[in-house]
Image: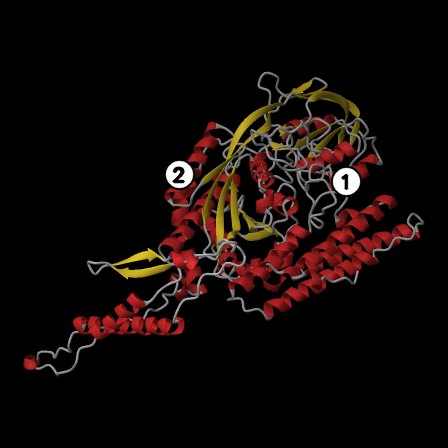
């Protein structure tokens, strides 16, 4: 090492550089001197920095570089050897005196790192269903139902706010990141100083019940009985009695209160009175009826946009607000009117069960109706909690229930709120304690102002439409899930039919040993179970306004004469009447309803593939197209329509079928355990419902834009009944491109779009 060092120092001492030279000083330390001789220039030579300036070439360049490289390498090797010798420890022989075998010790190896499977990896589908059913017991619901049973709970009241705060606290305790959505809405209430009144001769009636969003005012006209107020009913009456300017007396049922008033207004009536006939509703004849007559949902004074406090929209009104006054009366009051109404006989189809009443059509005596309802500004709170998904947290299933009611609202609100809370507790416990890992999120929503037309829910949809409609997988409505115990009905998007069927097979009918599926006709279940979704259904705005696959379901009694619970909108919607309907098994039936909703949710958030069957829409589409063909042919043969054919619509139907088949093939050929591939395919499936919303109508004028289930001239059902040739031709063209657009949206790539149309 000393030889190397001496050689290297000698080399460094003797080497000259073009600008710097290392010189030894007198004390043997080296210092640097600038060698200016290399920069010396003749007179007239270019100064340094000129283009021709070059430093003097170094001397002995190659040999110098070689020596430097060798020297550095030798120093590095020598340093490495010294370090190795100084730090190396000799092998230690173990002590053999204790009977141990003599061997060289080696460092202990760390245990191999293994990928720890997620907790759910050990949970099969059967394990998950068993867990969920076990936690949703009737004992739990007995306590929860008592907790939410309140005598009053009107929207925006102190009691409503108390319930909202309690639900928020529960979500908070469960660690579900709760939040509140606040809206400022206008609700119509009776005027306590000027009660609504009906005058008929010497009879004066001052009903306590009322119809929210009725047009205020005082009108007089001939009293006419119009049965249920369906279009066919009023057409029949019109042939015998002039409806222009009349006050129509209608019995509730068959269609919604809002549809009854709308039909009456279009026939020229000046006001409407509605009562509960004992043939349809098994109630005492003094029962007061409450409801609303807005042909829509949400706050009718902010149509299409949310009722936030900071919104600065010009005053506007929903097109669904009635143009005539409407008021409810008791069956006793209706009987008094019908006894004196006179006029021609209405026939057997118009007869109810009120005693000593002939059910004549009237038209001979005037009646006066005075409605003094007033608008009241109310602050309402929607309350939310969430269990976030582990794979696709931005895709979520929403479970919702209203908590307000006209009175106690035991069936309408108490049961639904109880199911919502117990499902939240169950899923929370499955995640925290049992290792369940949902792929998608679950949102639990408690709505307010549901009795006024799903106001709270609709305002939420309007406020966050851009971030909701493309992310919500399904909406499951929990309102009124228990109305009885012997039978089962449901209204849903066809996308959910397959999931409904599989879930019905897994849940037992209350107090039965067999499943809901077997009890409801097995393979014929669709005929027995499925019902059209009415505009009054709380799930309807999610489906027809937002384009979200939605479902409402109900356990009912076999003796139901109407499509709805007979005590809705009355003070009779209480615990005693529901217990009577369930044979005092309300908690058992509620547990079964919770299991049905819970298993649907579980399947939607657990599986790789979304259980939304796009092929199920082909049947309803085909049926509607055939009806349109029939209508076009009739108008063409009558000479009212020329050069119009539904063939293009039929081709769009074919495009939908091919797109649905392509999705089915993609499912068969896709590795659904690949999260990215599964998400791409699921996104194609989720586009279907939303793409069936017509882009050609105004959300303000026609909020229910769905091509199949909406309300307006744009729907296939409306086109099939259109008699105006110009209207039919225009709407047929728009519907064709609406359906074709849905088929195009289902295609994975733009270059794969079916252009056969």
* Residue at x 64% of width, y 64% of height: 663
**Residue at the far left in the pictured view:** 97
Q: Which percent across, then down, holds residue 598?
A: 48, 53
The secondary structure type at the circle numbered 2 is helix
Q: Quadrant of residue 648?
A: bottom right
In whole angstroms, how far apart are the C-alphas of marks 2 and 1?
48 Å
Closer-to-camera residue (190/71): 71
Instruction: Please provide percent x and percent y for residue 494.
Output: 64, 56
Scheme of colours in the image? secondary structure
Horizontal side of 400 relative to 371 (left or right) equals left
Q: In the image, what residue occupies the spot 51% across and 63% down?
A: 675
Query: Dot 2 corresponds to which residue?
Result: 169
Where residue 454 appears, x then y in whole percent? Answer: 59, 38
Above or below, 240 against 427 in this view is above
- Residue 231's tag is 1
- Outermost right residue: 639
Pick the residue in front: 519 or 374.
374
Horizontal side of residue 630 vs 504, given as left or right: right
- Nearer the observer: mark 2 or 1; the answer is 2
């Amino acid at each position: 090492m000393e030889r190397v060092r001496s050689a290297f120092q000698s080399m460094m001492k003797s080497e000259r550089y073009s600008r710097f030279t290392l010189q030894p000083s007198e004390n043997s330390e080296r210092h640097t001197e600038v060698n200016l001789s290399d920069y010396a220039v003749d007179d007239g030579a270019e100064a340094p920095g000129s283009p021709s300036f070059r430093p003097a070439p170094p001397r002995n360049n190659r040999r110098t570089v070689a020596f430097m490289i060798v020297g550095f390498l030798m120093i590095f090797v020598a340093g490495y050897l010294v370090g190795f010798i100084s730090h190396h420890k000799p092998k230690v022989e173990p002590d053999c005196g204790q009977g141990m075998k003599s061997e060289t010790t080696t460092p202990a190896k760390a245990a191999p790192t293994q990928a720890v499977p997620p907790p759910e990896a050990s949970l099969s589908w059967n394990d998950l269903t068993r867990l969920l059913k076990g936690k949703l017991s009737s004992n739990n619901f007995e306590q929860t139902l008592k907790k939410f049973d309140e005598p009053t709970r009107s929207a925006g009241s102190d009691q409503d706010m108390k319930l909202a705060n309690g639900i928020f606290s529960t979500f908070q305790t469960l660690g579900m990141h709760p939040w509140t959505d606040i809206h400022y809405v206008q609700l119509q209430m009776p005027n306590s100083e000027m009660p609504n009144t009906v005058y008929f001769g010497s009879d004066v009636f001052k009903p306590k019940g009322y119809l929210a969003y009725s047009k205020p005012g005082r009108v007089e006209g001939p009293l006419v009985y119009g049965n249920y107020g369906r279009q066919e009913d009023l057409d029949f009456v019109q042939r015998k009695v002039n409806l222009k300017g009349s006050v129509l007396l209608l019995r509730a049922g068959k269609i919604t209160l809002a549809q009854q008033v709308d039909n009456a207004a279009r026939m020229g009536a000046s006001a409407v009175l509605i009562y509960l006939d004992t043939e349809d509703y098994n109630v005492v004849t003094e029962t007061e009826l409450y409801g609303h007559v807005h042909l829509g949902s949400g706050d009718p004074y902010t149509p299409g946009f949310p009722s936030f406090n900071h919104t600065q929209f010009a005053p506007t009104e929903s097109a669904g607000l009635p143009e005539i006054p409407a008021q409810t009366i008791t069956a006793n009051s209706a009987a008094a009117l019908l006894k004196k109404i006179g006029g021609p006989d209405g026939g057997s189809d118009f007869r109810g069960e009120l005693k000593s009443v002939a059910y004549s059509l009237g038209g001979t005596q005037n009646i006066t109706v005075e409605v003094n309802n007033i608008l009241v500004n109310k602050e309402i709170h929607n309350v939310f909690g969430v269990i976030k998904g582990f794979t696709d947290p931005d895709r979520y299933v929403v479970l919702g229930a209203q908590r307000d009611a006209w009175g106690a609202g035991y069936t309408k609100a108490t049961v639904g709120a109880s199911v919502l809370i117990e499902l939240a507790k169950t899923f929370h416990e499955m995640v925290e304690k049992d290792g369940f890992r949902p792929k998608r999120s679950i949102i639990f929503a408690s709505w307010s102002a549901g009795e006024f037309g799903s106001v709270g829910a609709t305002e939420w949809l309007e406020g966050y439409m851009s971030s909701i409609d493309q992310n919500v997988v399904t909406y499951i409505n929990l309102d009124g899930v228990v109305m009885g115990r012997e039978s089962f009905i449901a209204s849903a998007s066809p996308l959910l039919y397959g999931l409904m069927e599989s879930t019905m097979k897994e849940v037992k009918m209350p107090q039965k040993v067999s499943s809901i599926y077997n009890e409801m006709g097995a393979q014929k279940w669709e005929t027995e179970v499925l019902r059209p979704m009415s505009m009054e259904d709380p799930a309807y705005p999610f489906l027809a306004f937002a384009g979200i696959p939605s479902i409402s379901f109900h356990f009912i009694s076999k003796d139901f004469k109407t499509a709805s619970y007979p005590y809705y909108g009355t003070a009779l919607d209480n615990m005693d009447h529901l217990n009577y309907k369930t044979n005092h098994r309300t908690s058992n039936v509620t547990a079964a309803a919770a299991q049905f909703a819970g298993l649907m949710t579980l399947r939607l958030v657990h599986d790789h593939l979304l259980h939304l069957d796009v092929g199920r829409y082909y049947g309803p589409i085909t049926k509607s197209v055939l009806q349109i063909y029939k209508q076009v042919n009739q108008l063409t043969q009558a000479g009212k329509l020329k050069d119009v054919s539904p063939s293009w619509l039929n081709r769009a139907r074919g495009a939908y079928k091919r797109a649905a088949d392509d999705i089915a093939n993609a499912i068969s050929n896709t590795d659904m355990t690949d999260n990215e591939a599964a998400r791409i395919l699921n996104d194609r499936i989720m586009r279907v419902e939303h793409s069936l919303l017509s882009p050609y109508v105004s959300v303000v004028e026609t909020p229910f834009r769905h091509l199949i289930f909406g309300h307006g001239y744009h729907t296939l059902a409306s086109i099939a009944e259109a008699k105006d040739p110009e209207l039919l031709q225009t709407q047929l063209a728009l519907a064709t491109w609406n359906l074709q657009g849905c088929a195009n949206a289902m295609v994975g790539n733009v270059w794969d779009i079916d252009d056969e149309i």
